[in-house]
Amino acid sequence: MRFMVMIKANEDSEAGVLPSQELLTAMGKYNEELVKAGVMLAGEGLQASSKGARVRFSGNQRTVIDGPFSETKELIAGFWIIQVKSKEEAIEWVKRCPNPLEGESEIEIRQIFEATDFGDEFTPELREQEARLGAQMAENAKR
């Protein structure tokens, strides 16, 4: 089972306050544990929403909204993608994480859909396309 583990943003992360050397060291050690255990598939910190944009869809229309975004508690400051046997195992790994932000912080864990979750709607042709795109993404990641 794959999970996206998301660090919720706070006022400091949205203000562009960078983590201390101590926190970077602790996070590096935690990431090493995840990688050595074969759990971590990806993980990155995200720049503040002031450097981002949203695209709102309404039928065929697209509207671009530049950051920053005001709902700080709903924003993401970083993420991991992990592969574990259960939600409970994902929770146990997250509980071992150093506090990712100064003061209080929150990490959200969400399961990622797998092809089998879509049932018959995910036709053999769509499965083949998914496999082809996955192989191409793996190649792109090598660059």
Image (spheres, rainbow, N blue to C red):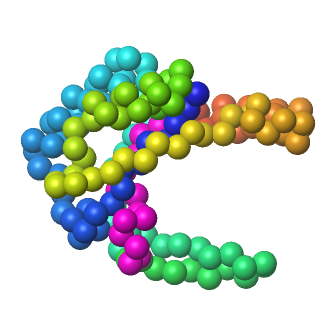
Residue 94: x and y in percent read 35, 35
Assess whether residue 65 is covered by the magenta stretch.
no
Assess whether residue 79 is covered by the magenta stretch.
yes
Q: Residue drawn at (23%, 33%), measured in percent from left and top?
A: 28
Above-or-below relation of 105 to 4: below
Among the 4 quarters of the image, the one containing residue 34: top left
The answer to whether 42 appears left or right of 17 in the picture is right
Q: Which residues are magenta?
A: 69-81
Among the 4 quarters of the image, the one containing residue 136: top right
The answer to whether 31 appears left or right of 128 in the picture is left
Residue 124: x and y in percent read 89, 32
The answer to whether 138 appears left or right of 33 in the picture is right
Q: Nearer the viewer, residue 68 or 140?
A: 68
Residue 76: x and y in percent read 40, 58
Q: Residue drawn at (53%, 43%), measured in percent from left and top?
A: 110
Among the 4 quarters of the image, the one containing residue 111: top right
Above-or-below relation of 44 to 16: above
Q: Residue drawn at (78%, 78%), measured in percent from left and top?
A: 59
Above-or-below relation of 16 to 80: below
**Residue extending furthest front?**
88
